[in-house]
Amino acid sequence: MTATTYRPRATYRSRPGALHATLLAGTVPLFLGALLSDVAYYRTFEIQWTIFASWLIAGGLMFGGLAILFALVGLFRAANKGGRPLAYLLLLIATWVLGFINALEHAKDAWAVMPLGLVLSVIVTLLACVATGVGLAKRRAGGVA
C-alpha cells in the first residue's frame, strides 16, 4: 500500500505582484477624482473642473491599460483560464473601454460634457472599484475562490 499526498494545484497567483497591485489600485483614485471633478463642474459650471477630470481620466486609462497587460500575462500563466482570472480581465477591459469613451466625452466643449460625462464617470468609477476588489481578493490554495 502506498501513501499518497494531496498537493493542491495552483491555478492562479494568490495575489498580484507589487507593481500590478499598485497600477490596479491607482486606477480607483484617478477615476474617483474625475467623478468628483465632474460633480464639482455640475454644481459650479467652472470649466477648470472638466479639465481636471480629463487629466485624471487620462491617468486612470494609463494605469488601467498597464494593469490589463499584467492581468493578461496572469491569465496566460494560469492553468485554469476561466473563472476569476477571466472575469478580472474582462472587468478591467470594460473599465478601460468605458473610460476611453468617457475621455472622448470630456474632449468636447465644457458645456457639452454634461450629463453624459457625469454618468460615465460614475459607471467607470464603480467598475474600477469592482475590478480592483476582484483583482486584489485573496484566493485559497488551489485557486479556489
Image (cartoon, rainbow, N blue to C red):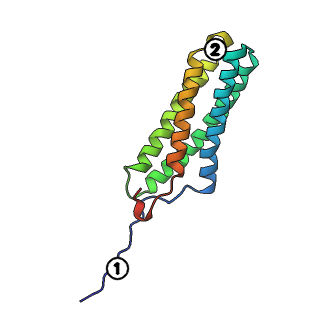
- For badge 1, the amino acid type reads Thr
Q: Residue at x 66, y 38 (%)?
A: 29
- The one nearer the camera, 66 or 82, is 82
Q: Where, by quadrant of the figure, is residue 27 drawn?
A: top right
Residue of label 1: 5
Task: Name the side, left or right, on which 53 lies relative to 101.
Answer: right
Where is residue 52? Give x, y as percent.
Answer: 72, 25
Callout 2 environment at 10 Å: few (<14), some (14 to 19), or many (20+)? few
N-terminal label among 1 and 2:
1
Where is residue 36? Give x, y as percent.
Answer: 67, 27
Where residue 108 is drawn, which disc sits there? 2
In the displayed structure, 116 sits above or below 13; it is above
Q: Residue at x 49, y 53 (%)?
A: 74
Task: Name the side, left or right, on which 145 lies relative to 39.
Answer: left
Quadrant in which the N terminus appears: bottom left
- For badge 2, the amino acid type reads Lys
Q: Where, by quadrant of the figure, is residue 145 drawn?
A: bottom left
Q: Residue at x 38, y 49 (%)?
A: 83
In the displayed structure, 116 sits above or below 90; it is above
Q: Secondary structure at mark 1?
A: loop
Where is residue 41? Give x, y as percent.
Answer: 69, 18
Q: CA distance from mark 1 to mark 2?
A: 63 Å
Where residue 141 is drawn, which disc sits there? none
Q: Secondary structure at mark 2?
A: loop
- The one nearer the camera, 25 or 79, is 25
